[in-house]
Image (cartoon, rainbow, N blue to C red):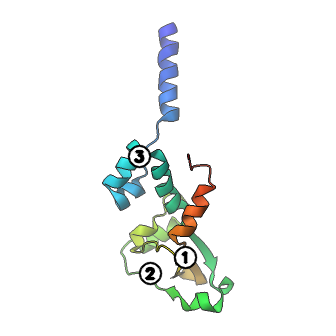
């Protein structure tokens, strides 16, 4: 009975504490994501945070005139509709839309129904991450 309890406890703790690498990161960053996952969990957490919190979806009418002038169309991609269906979930991957973050500028992309995908600048995402619980430093 003791052996069963020990094995049960070990299997439970392994399943609770084991974490799998986010496939979006493997697709986007390859070996960098795998290395961060293995050796620097805070860097890995930042990369996940960047994907999950690096964008917003807002109504076009909520933008200023200056912001509206910056609206672009998304690059033509075969999986745009699929990715747009994932907005707001942990499966959404804006990188597969053919866009990437800029260091200091927000980017605005037109979505259906007069919605706008806003990509936040890396500097702003970093500031948000500093205050987030997933930041382990």
Residue ranking furthest to the front: 137
- Above-or-below relation of 112 to 92: below
Question: In this figure, what is the number of numbered marks?
Answer: 3
Numbered tag placed on residue 35 in the rendering: none
Q: Which residue is mark 3?
A: 37
The image quadrant of residue 123 is bottom right
Residue ranking furthest to the left: 31
Whole-angstrom CA distance, mark 2 to mark 3, is 30 Å
Numbered tag placed on residue 117 in the rendering: 1
- Above-or-below relation of 116 to 17: below
Q: Position of residue 89 (x, y in %)?
A: 55, 60
Q: Is residue 87 visible?
A: yes
Give SS at disc 1: strand
Give SS at disc 3: helix
Q: Which residue is mark 2?
A: 74
Residue in the image at 38% along x and 42% along y: 38
């Amino acid at each position: 009975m003791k052996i069963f309890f020990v094995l049960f406890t070990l299997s439970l703790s392994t399943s609770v504490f084991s974490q799998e690498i986010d496939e979006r990161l493997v697709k986007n960053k390859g070996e960098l994501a795998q290395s961060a996952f293995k050796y620097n969990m805070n860097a890995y957490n930042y990369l996940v945070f960047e994907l999950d919190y690096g964008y917003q979806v807002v109504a076009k009418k909520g933008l200023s005139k200056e912001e509206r002038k910056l609206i672009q169309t998304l690059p033509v991609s075969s999986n745009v509709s699929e990715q747009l269906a994932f907005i707001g979930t942990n499966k959404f991957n804006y990188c597969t839309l053919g866009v990437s973050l800029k260091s200091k500028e927000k980017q605005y992309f037109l979505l259906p129904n007069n919605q706008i995908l806003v990509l936040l600048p890396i500097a702003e995402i970093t500031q948000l991450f500093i205050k987030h619980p997933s930041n382990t430093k």
